[in-house]
Amino acid sequence: MDSDLYPDLAAAGSLAAALEQQAAELGVDLTVVPGGWGPLVSAGIASSVPERKPLSVHIGAESRWFGVSGWSRGVELITGATPDLADVVRAGAAWGRGRSLGELRAELSFLRSSERAEAHERGPAAVVELQWRTTREEAAEEPDFTGFGELVEAAHAEPRLRQLYVFSSHWTLGFSSCTGYPFRAEVAIVPSHNGSPFHLKQHPHSDDVLGEAATAEEAVALAVRHLPTDLGPAVTGTAEQEAEADGEIQLATHGRGG
């Protein structure tokens, strides 16, 4: 940390201590928690809203600025940078109280949010719809890779896949039952390339091939047959949160003697 850029942090001894001192001066009640890159350069501001992670705060190396990032259920909702530590305290307080994205941006002009973050506020169906639109636009911009475009359109035409969150990794199309990262891939399809067949996988990064198909439509039909029969539309959250919820249900069931 450059003490010339951050004399307030140097005097306080850490970013966390400087945030606490600034909050006291402003009369703002904050709970500061450890950051991910050490106490001198990072910290977090806790939120009273359960699904919101602490607002992450870190400092710039070559010029004075404080970067902030707010995540909820696997989605980055708000981000921004400012040279004013008081603005960071105000942002942390507003984030922790559960202010909406529009309210956060109105109160603090250095904050911004993405189209996906705004869709997240409206619910999982809005996130899924946006992701499909974005994916189809990206496929249309790759006219030379016809296998990928054919796969995206065939998958979009299938209702059971269209209700899931679609994502791609190295051109492999994954379908998640949750909208936050890390995703819970229910199935994935590798597009045809240079005459190769379409390959079905459990996850974009898995090595096992579950099946092959000659056309995009056949690959989509094969993928649908591998989906859980009771699988509904994608929900808000992450694979980790779904696993925790499943574990709590199992514990409750065993506790009742189930």
Image (spheres, grey):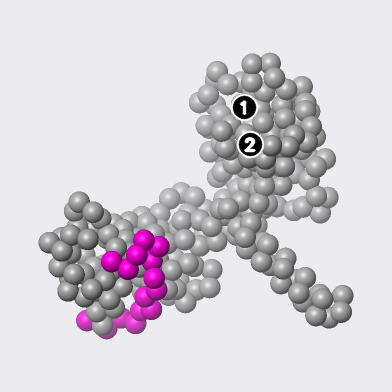
User: Looking at the image, which is closer to me, 15 or 216?
Assistant: 15
Magenta stretch holds residue 81: no
Q: Say what secondary structure mark 2 lies in.
A: strand
Give, as a three-letter code, the residue at label 2.
Leu
Q: Residue 86 location, x and y as percent?
A: 24, 70
Give, as a three-letter code, the residue at label 1.
Phe
Tell me the residue at 77%/52% (across/down): 231
Q: Can residue 42 be seen in this view?
A: yes
Q: In the picture provided, is 73 more to the left or to the right than 219?
A: left
Q: Give the range drawn in magenta.
A: 25-40
Residue 257 against residue 182 in the figure, above or below: below
Q: Tell me which secondary structure the magenta stretch mostly adopts.
A: loop
> Residue tagged by mark 2?
173
Q: Say what secondary structure mark 1 lies in.
A: helix
In which quadrant is the C terminus drawn?
Answer: bottom right
> Residue tagged by mark 1?
148
Q: How many marks?
A: 2
| Cβ–Cβ under 8 Å for marks 1 and 2 | yes
